[in-house]
Image (tube, helix red, strand yellow):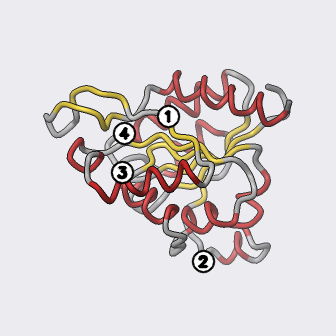
Amino acid sequence: MADTSVLLIIGGGIAAYKSLELIRELKRRGIGVRCILTRAGEQFVTPLSVAALSGEKAYTDLFSLTDEVEMGHIELSRSADLVVVAPATANLMGKCANGLADDLASTALLATDKPVLMAPAMNVRMWEHAAVRRNAATLKADGVELIGPDEGEMACGEFGPGRMAEPAAIADAIEGRLSRTSA
């Protein structure tokens, strides 16, 4: 997968820790990774950890003077071959499904002309909520590919669908999507 790259958007949720392993797995497979970390994502993993593993700056702020002088959200959203959201929280999925853009992550999602792959991760009750199901259906109709969520025990102690897919499975889906894009 030489000369391929993804823009990884890391949403806020306990599953964000898996995004660090996803970065490692993608780098191991020769896929370049640039990352946007949401404010909520920063509560679970740090920009320093993300930058250290990706070898690239971790982007966090829509209104960064240094990044936005050159319309960073546009450049970020279009420089990669694929945009990946992992974990894709109910909030990020809802924003994308409804065309809302109030931070760097949601703005980049609306500005991209690249394929988008989302790995949902949330509490089972959230995943089963009618609004989230509707947003997931809208995203699929708009061409967004979803991987997961998996079923299992949640950090909150509940059990059911809502766990983010494992990093290796997401990396496999990314490779599959990248091979279809380059074909």
Residue 88, image x and y in percent? Answer: 45, 48
Dot 4 or dot 2, earlier in sequence: 4
Residue identifier under label 2: 63
Amino acid at dot 4: Ala
Residue 96: where, in percent of width, then height?
Answer: 52, 62
Q: Name the mark nearer the viewer: 2 or 3.
A: 3
User: What mark, if any, has residue 15 been given in the picture?
Assistant: 4
Disc 1 crowd rating (10 Å Cα; few below 14, some 14-19, many 20+) is: some
**Callout 2: helix, strand or loop?**
loop
Task: Look at the image and tell me in which quarter the C terminus lies.
Answer: top right
Name which residue lies at 54% across and 70% down: 99
Instruction: Choose the circle earlier in sequence order: 1 or 2.
Output: 2
Towards the viewer: 172 or 41: 172
Other-residue count near label 3 (Cα within 10 Å), few / some / many at <14 / 14–19 / ≥20: some
What residue is rendered at 71% in x and 58% in y?
A: 77
Q: Quadrant of residue 158?
A: top left
* Residue 67 in the image: above or below residue 133: below
Residue sitting at 76 percent across and 77 percent down? 69
Tell me where residue 64 appears, x and y as whole percent: 62, 74
Residue denoted by label 3: 133
Q: Which amino acid type corresponds to the residue marked 1 in the rendered image?
A: Ile
Residue nearest the observer in this picture, 10 or 145:
145
Q: Considering only order in the chain, which callout, 3 or 2, is on the residue closer to the N terminus?
A: 2
Q: Earlier in the sequence, mark 3 or mark 4?
A: 4
The CA distance from mark 3 to mark 4 is 20 Å
Report crowding for label 2: few under 14, some 14 to 19, many 20 or more residues within 10 A (C-alpha): some
Q: Which quarter of the rendering shows the N terminus? A: top right
- Which one is in front in this view, the residue at disc 3 or the one at disc 4? 3
Residue that badge 1 annotates: 147
Cα distance between the residues tagged 4 and 2: 26 Å
